[in-house]
Image (cartoon, helix red, strand yellow):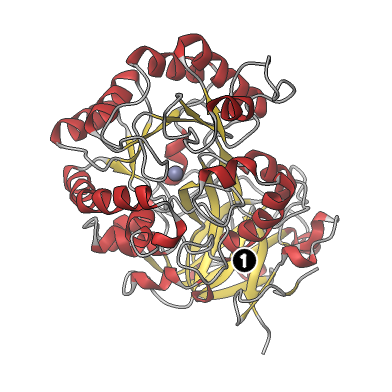
Amino acid sequence: MTRRNAIPPGSSTTQTISNANFSTNSNHAIDCAPRVTDGEWPEPSSHSPSSPASIPPSPPGSLLDLMAGTTHLINASLLLPGRGKPQHNMSIILQGGTITSIQPTASVPPPFKNLPTTTVPVLMPGLWDCHIHLLGSKTFNFAEIATQSTALAGARIARNVHDILMSGFTSVRELAGYGLEVSKAIEEGTLVGPNIYSSGAAISQTAGHGDVFDLPSGFVDSLFGVRDTQSNAMSPGMGPMIIADGVDECRRAVRLLIRRGAKCIKVFASGGVLSIADDPLRQQFSLDELKVIVEEAQRAGRVVGAHCHGKDGIMAALHAGVHTIEHGTYMDKECVELMKKQGTVYVPTRTIVKVGVDHPELMSPESYRKMLETARHHRDAYRLAVKSGVKIALGTDLGISTPATHPLAHGRSGGELAYAVRDGGMAPLQAIEAATAMGPEVLGGLGMAPKSGRIEAGYDADLVALIADPLENMDLFKDPDNITHVWKGGRLFKSPLPL
Ligand SMILES: [Zn+2]
């Protein structure tokens, strides 16, 4: 079932799948490929990243199967593979949720030209936002986040995940919030949204970035503590934050999050901006606490992402072995050298810095003062990282459920690509790689990363089409209307309205 998007002010010129119209039948997307059985289609031939896979001269499966929608052909005037150079006049075949073949359009054998076909001007991998929060709150007020109804939060998030997918972001890493729970509703077909790779809660120390300074500490502990002797006894670790102090509690926090289903672990290794009373320049957690978090996570195949602004926090997190540095506001040469040596990925979150300074009404006066101070340093750190060749994956830190037209609303992640070029100093193609092929790398190499973010045979068929070449205008990503098609796992979730 596909319908015009009924949620204003969503994409006005395209046909989308809307959570307002969801059915319990997961078939609500246009099913391009998921029912293939083994042997119906040839294995893609082996290929190098620079040479497209070839399509065999004739299909061994029945042409009727092909015509029945088990496979799908996309012709693109311009193909941006995510990693590597742009290619012109290319065709790809999707099968079983996977990209199976990439070929110059002129070389596609005649039987394949009869496949269900979509022709687009520009095709690229679905985008990744590697740092978001699904909190369902209307402001950055931590007390509101901590105490609001989770049903209300969930209802708002249902809208948010829809908008994220329709803006071309087929995958997100969620680093504190309700992403783990919401991803189950998406996977079962109840909601329309991106692939969500979530940490569940973020781990904070008492008086850390995840503490709620304007609520009594006992109350905060009863909501977010790791111990089961408090009022959260039935569900410690199930909120958007988890408070842990000392090595043993840190170990238990990680285990609780893994029990909840976390795909990665998030820790606050320095103070933050949106918390009221802590200092972004100060390290949070001792080195021993950070080390046990990394050790425990790695034992379960998860890598750790560390929120940090000040240098002390960055260096402690790196010495503990975290895999990603988030924000990195006061990163200097020493930090960058160590990151390169250890293969650490930097996630700049430029959107929250750039747009946050325009919206004091969304945060406390204390937080706004910190926001202004952070904004004074962040661009230099970002440029240093780009210049030094540190691995970078794009993330926005978008996290509140403001109306969809607001610049901090979910579905507005595309601006991060233009910031990467203008503020970070990346080349346009580099920014696209940081928003596609680099995405899975934030989940590390221990088994949690999907094969996505690239147009390559064997990769997930997560794809988007654009109205024009973004290399000529990176601002195209800012407006979801410029994303004409969205495929996730080979299924079409957004396409232009028929004339
Ligand atoms: Zn964040």
In screen coordinates, is 231 left or right of 349? right
Q: Is residue 306 visible?
A: yes
| Quadrant of the image occupied by residue 325 | top left
| Labels in figure, total | 1
Query: What secondary structure is found at the residue carrying circle 1?
Result: strand
- Please state which amino acid type lies under the numbered disc 1: Leu
From the viewer's side, name the closer residue of 468 and 254. 254
In screen coordinates, is 58 left or right of 217? right
Residue at 50% x, 39% y: name it.
175
- Please say if 232 is above or below 133: above
In screen coordinates, is 430 left or right of 223? left
Residue denoted by label 1: 73
Q: Which residue sits furthest bottom?
A: 499
Ligand 1 quarter of the rendering: top left
Quick check: is the Cβ at mark 1 less than 8 Å away from ligand 1?
A: no
- Please say if 234 is above or below 454: above
Q: Position of residue 157 (x, y in %)?
A: 65, 54
Q: Which residue sits furthest left?
A: 333
Quarter placement of the C terminus: bottom right
Q: Position of residue 20 (x, y in %)?
A: 76, 66
Q: Are there few (<14), some (14-19), or many (20+) residues within 10 Å of tag 1?
A: many
Residue at 78% x, 53% y: name it.
190
From the viewer's side, name the closer residue of 39 and 426. 426
- Please say if 115 is above or below 56: below
Quarter placement of the N terminus: bottom right
Q: Position of residue 358 (x, y in %)?
A: 35, 65
In screen coordinates, is 473 left or right of 436? left
Q: Which residue sits furthest right?
A: 24
Residue at 30% x, 27% y: name it.
283
Q: Is residue 455 visible?
A: no
Q: Position of residue 82 (x, y in %)?
A: 41, 55
